[in-house]
Image (cartoon, grey):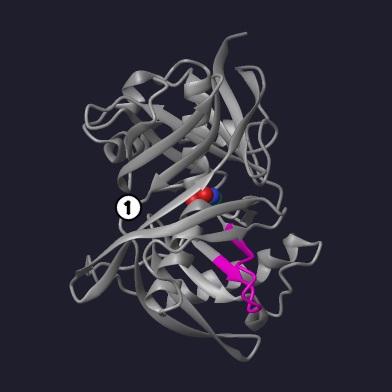
Amino acid sequence: MERTEFITVDTHTGGEPTRIVLDGIEADTLAGETVRERRDRFEATADGVRKLLMQEPRGHADMFGAVPVPTDRADLGVFFMDTDGYLDMCGHGLIGVVTALIERGELPEAPELTVETPAGLVDVTVKIADGVVRRVAFENVDSYVCETVTVEQDGVPVEARIVYSGNYFAVVDADSLGVVLNSEDATQCIDPALELRRAVNDAAPKDPVTGTRATVSAVELTASDDSDRSCVVFADGSVDRSPCGTGTCARLTLHHVDGDLAVGERVEVTGPVGSTFEGYITDTSVDSGVTVTSPVVSGTAHITGEHTFYQNDDDTLGSFTLS
Ligand code: PYC
């Protein structure tokens, strides 16, 4: 029997997991100049490793992961994956990776770091006390509103605002999908959110800055009572337990563009399990006639464990998601 081993350290950020792969991935499957190229090569040549570590029986329907990779453009390179594929940027994952690598001594205890992600360079500020990372803030890549798409759901028109914040989000009022956000049951968001994402992507929204198609990967349901409570559904129906880092950036950008949030004004957002992130807009500019913001979001992560996963060649079950 032949065995391949994968070493991970796992964290949670406001309840949302990040399984960080430290060892076991073959170097040639991560080859590339940029982090995006390394991620694309991994997807093309080693996607089975993502499935092995994210899906059952080693992961679960809401598992999330990150792969740190070498870069000479920043202090750290990292790409993100889930049970269904890959995201270009992830706030909770970034907070988890920075926390774990500093606490394990694999990143310097520096108050400021730069991280290269597939979406671009992200500046990170870290608060450390007694060797423990207390808080991580990241200034995301540029964020902007793309367009508003109206789709029909159960015969009713629903308005979704498409925002880029490292990933494309469809931001929608939970009421319009018949969902009450502060109920006990966040899983009620999944089906309406996935149906909305399908309908929005069928409408082929455009990115006004790049001129390309804006393919929505995540749906952010927001409460209409101004509580800044939200629930983000992504991948194949995963619910982000945290308030979602890139989702918070999308929300901040919308608030700013709507005239409800001044530059520098701080907002606390609450996710489905009651954990919070804080955010603000640090700067704005205009590109292609569109207001572009630089959002900053901060939160806290904790290491939950370390794992050595086995892939034995006599184990023929493979990886799966239960649908
Ligand atoms: O924190 O940006 C985030 C995120 C995206 C998907 C899950 N979490």
- Residue at position x 44%, y 71% from top? 261
- Looking at the image, which residue sits at the far left? 288
Taking the image as shown, residue 181 lies to the left or right of residue 76, namely right
CA neighbours of label 1 inside 10 A, class few (<14), some (14 to 19), many (20+) = many
Indicate whether 135 appears above or below 139: above
Give residue 141's position: percent from left, percent from top. Answer: 32, 52
Check if residue 168 falls in the magenta segment: no
Give residue 288's position: percent from left, percent from top. Answer: 18, 72
Label 1 lies in ligand 1 vicinity (Cβ under 8 Å): no
- Looking at the image, which residue sits at the far right? 184
Taking the image as shown, residue 252 lies to the left or right of residue 147, namely right
> Toward the viewer: 319 or 80?
80
Report whether residue 6 is seen.
yes
> Toward the viewer: 282 or 308?
282
State the extent of the magenta-drawn residues as a range.
220-233
> Toward the viewer: 86 or 1?
86
**The quarter of the displayed image where residue 4 is located:** top right
- Residue at position x 63%, y 83% from top? 176
Report whether residue 48 is seen.
no
**The quarter of the displayed image where residue 122 is located:** top left
Residue bearing mark 1: 141
- Amino acid marked by disc 1: Val
Where disc 1 sits, the SS reads loop
Give residue 24's position: percent from left, percent from top. Answer: 48, 17
Taking the image as shown, residue 234 lies to the left or right of residue 122, namely right
**The quarter of the displayed image where residue 226 is located:** bottom right
Check if residue 232 falls in the magenta segment: yes
Placement of the N terminus among the 4 image quadrants? top right
Indicate whether 133 appears above or below 12: above
> Toward the viewer: 65 or 263?
263
Looking at the rendered structure, the number of numbered marks drawn on it comes to 1
